[in-house]
Amino acid sequence: MIGPGTGVRVYLACGPTDMRKGIAGLAALAQDVLRQNPAGGAVFAFRGRRGDRLKLLYWDGQGFCLYYKVLERGRFPWPVAGDGAARLTSAQLAMLWEGIDWRRPDWGAPPARVS
């Protein structure tokens, strides 16, 4: 995905979001609901009611970028609606974008010991 680099702040809007909203509507949610400056360089993630749609809003310094992904199968993992907002790392955002459950990643076996 072309987008923000590592170390960026990521905020998830818990609960469903109306996916008809565009940049202005999502920026208003980031400001009013998440209490963050939408042009502050953070990534804001919003998921639709069915769970198969994800929008990311990001200010790159020149303007807003809006990323939109629809899964053919499955749902994006998401916290319960009562949580309000959640913070993720940039690595967790990458997992979320790929449809991997960022809450319980399967890292496999630890590396073998080198002798």
Image: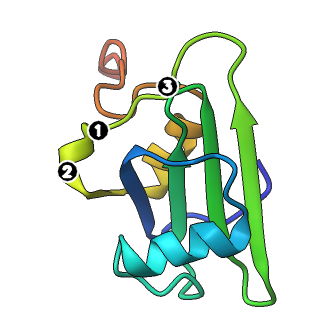
Local crowd size for mark 1, using a 10 Å CA cut-off: few (<14), some (14–19), many (≥20): some
Q: Position of residue 62 (x, y in %)?
A: 81, 89
User: Helix or strand or loop: what does disc 3 sit on?
Assistant: loop
Q: Position of residue 38 (x, y in %)?
A: 54, 81
What distance separates the C-alpha of mark 3 from that of mark 2? 20 Å
Q: Is residue 47 above or below residue 23?
A: above
Q: Which mark is residue 83?
A: 2
Residue depth check, mark 1 versus mark 3: number of the one nearer the observer: 1
The front one of 8 and 58 is 58
Asked if the residue under mark 3 is in contact with the one under mark 1, i.e. CB atoms within 8 Å, the reply is no
Direction from residue 82 to residue 73 in the image, left or right: right
Which residue occupies 18% across, 46% down? 82
Q: Is residue 115 visible?
A: no
Please, what is the three-letter code of the amino acid marked with disc 1? Pro
Q: Amino acid at mark 2?
A: Asp
Which residue is depicted at the point 29% across and 25% down? Answer: 104
In whole angstroms, how far apart are the C-alphas of marks 1 and 3?
14 Å
Of labels 3 and 2, earlier in sequence is: 2
Q: Is residue 81 left or right of residue 10?
A: left
Tell me which numbered mark, 1 or 3, is placed earlier along the sequence.
Answer: 1
Q: Residues within 10 Å of mark 2 (few under 14, many from 20)?
A: few
The number of callouts visible is 3
Q: Which residue is mark 3?
A: 100
Location of residue 43 with respect to 59 vertically, above or below: above
